[in-house]
Image (cartoon, helix red, strand yellow):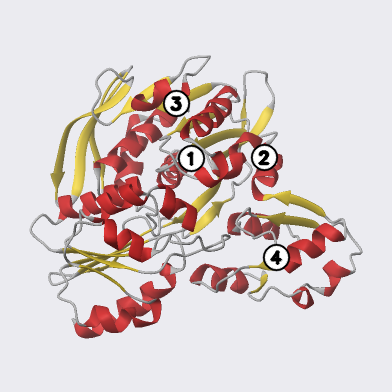
């Protein structure tokens, strides 16, 4: 949503809106001249929107609850209302679009693709789901460099993160698309995994030119017109990694491609899952005729995405990492990455579950992932758009966990609790408002250490 707000602001439009919680990101948007309020009350809607003299477009995310008074005001007064995904589809309709979809990995992969294209001077625009460390934004705007497609039309180059929630990605018809994973998620929308996979297959059928799939999910998608495959270790894939080593907290590896081996690749992001994400990005780079040298340079200089294994503190005494992980597979990847990087250190995690339905649907898997920690602190569930479900709470998760060193803590008590812990590596994990405690926690830990 914030990337779209920035886009329309850059186009010279007057932009205003509502968010549930003030954050560092909303502070930045306000500083950029975008008017934001945090109380759901129609009196906060700007007068020029209530009494419009020009066309008004209302853009919303499905995270807005159905009883939101401002949202209902716009519906009742017949404003033009579009989902975020619809607007993104409209913006990219006439562009040369590279889209990245998947349950996990899409933010890092789309951000890395955009960075590679930037390094190669292809000057893309990009609508991303996270704040890139390299550019400190989730919106990149091109300098109007355009490319010629096979039909001789001139089109802008755009990289987008394609969101599967609410089948949002079906508004996109990309030239090139990557699908990184299809683990079950958003079952409150899809009902079951089969229907979710059918939606991914439909998205795959909308790709105009090249479909890129992680090798292990080909059978889940069953692409009609074929695909290019990638993997971190499966040598039957079209692109795969080999000779992987960790040196000085960096991954060093080679990438086997249909045109030869890319040697001396270095990636500073932790976790084999990110090596795999980088391979997906290299497939796109090859399709866009980016040189091996530019790929190597881009991987080496890519700093990652905020809230994706995002180092807050990194000293000999203490490492503090913040991560957006909110699905069992994402938790597993993040925790295993920390254990891989710091094999002799105690790993403590603070996890805020996101959504009652997701917690209910994957409770056993959440427990197994959290059991990988040496110590776990659970916060209460962040509801977002949902109402509570009887019996679904953090205690339910806690009871399913086999880990002995586990507890539940209220958000207001976290700083005090953490200050009394023996910490080596601390992870904050979740997609709710846990990010609002990261800075205070960092400041507290700096004083203590």
Callout 4 secondary element: loop
Q: Position of residue 445 (x, y in %)?
A: 25, 79
Callout in the foreground (4, 2):
4
Say which residue label 3 marks: 212
Q: Which mark is residue 121?
A: 1
Q: Earlier in the sequence, mark 1 or mark 4?
A: 4
Total numbered badges shown on the rendered structure: 4
Could you tell which of marks 2 and 3 lies nearer the N-terminus? 2
Q: Going 86% across and 69% down the picture, which residue do you hit?
A: 50
55 shown above or below 422: above
The mark that comes first in sequence, 1 or 3, is: 1
Residue 175: give x, y in percent of width and height: 58, 27
Of pointers 4 and 2, the one earlier in the residue sequence? 4
- Asked whether 134 or 14 is in front, the reply is 14
* Most foreground residue, 352 or 158: 352
Please identify, in this view, whether the residue under mark 1 or under mark 3 is nearer the observer.
Answer: 3
Along the horizontal axis of the image, is 106 left or right of 8?
Answer: left
The x and y percentages for residue 258 are 33, 17
Question: How many other residues sit within 10 Å of disc 1, few (<14), some (14-19) or many (≥20)?
Answer: few
- Which of the labelled discs sits on residue 68, or is there none? 4
């Amino acid at each position: 949503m914030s990337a779209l707000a920035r886009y329309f602001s850059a186009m010279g439009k007057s932009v205003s809106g509502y968010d549930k919680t003030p954050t560092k990101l909303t502070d930045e948007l306000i500083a950029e001249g975008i008017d934001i309020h945090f109380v759901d009350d129609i009196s906060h809607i700007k007068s020029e929107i209530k009494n419009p003299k020009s066309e008004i477009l209302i853009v919303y995310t499905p995270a807005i609850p159905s009883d939101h008074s401002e949202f209902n005001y716009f519906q009742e007064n017949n404003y033009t209302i579009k989902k975020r995904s619809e607007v993104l589809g409209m913006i990219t309709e006439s562009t040369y679009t590279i889209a990245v979809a998947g349950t996990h990995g899409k933010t890092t992969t789309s951000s890395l693709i955009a960075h590679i294209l930037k390094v190669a001077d292809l000057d893309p625009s990009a609508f991303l789901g996270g704040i890139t460390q390299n550019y400190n934004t989730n919106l990149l705007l091109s300098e109007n460099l355009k490319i010629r497609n096979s039909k001789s039309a001139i089109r802008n180059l755009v990289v987008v993160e394609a969101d599967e929630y609410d089948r949002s990605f079906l508004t996109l018809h990309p030239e090139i698309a990557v699908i990184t994973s299809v683990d079950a998620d958003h079952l409150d929308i899809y009902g079951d995994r089969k229907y979710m996979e059918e939606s991914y297959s439909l998205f795959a059928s909308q790709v105009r030119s090249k479909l890129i799939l992680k090798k292990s999910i080909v059978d889940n998608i069953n692409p009609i017109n074929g695909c290019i495959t990638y993997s971190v270790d499966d040598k039957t894939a079209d692109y795969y990694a080999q000779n992987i080593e960790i040196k000085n907290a960096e991954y060093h590896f080679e990438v086997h491609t249909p045109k030869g081996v890319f040697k001396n690749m270095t990636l500073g992001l932790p976790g084999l899952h990110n090596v795999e994400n980088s391979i997906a990005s290299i497939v796109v780079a090859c399709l866009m005729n980016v040189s091996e040298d530019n790929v190597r340079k881009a991987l080496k200089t890519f700093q990652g995405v905020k809230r994706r294994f995002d180092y807050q503190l990194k000293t000999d005494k203490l490492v503090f990492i913040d991560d957006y992980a909110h699905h069992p597979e994402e938790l597993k990847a993040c925790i295993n990455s920390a254990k891989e990087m710091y094999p002799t250190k105690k790993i403590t995690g603070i996890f805020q579950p996101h959504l009652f339905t997701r917690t209910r649907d994957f409770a056993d898997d959440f427990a197994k992932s959290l059991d990988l920690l040496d110590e776990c602190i659970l916060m209460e569930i962040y509801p977002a758009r949902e109402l509570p479900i009887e019996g679904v709470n953090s205690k339910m998760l806690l009871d399913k966990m086999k880990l002995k060193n586990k507890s539940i803590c209220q958000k207001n008590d976290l700083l005090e609790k953490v200050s009394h812990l023996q910490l080596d590596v601390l992870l904050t994990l979740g997609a709710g408002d846990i990010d609002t405690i990261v800075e205070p926690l960092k400041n507290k830990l700096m004083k203590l250490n």
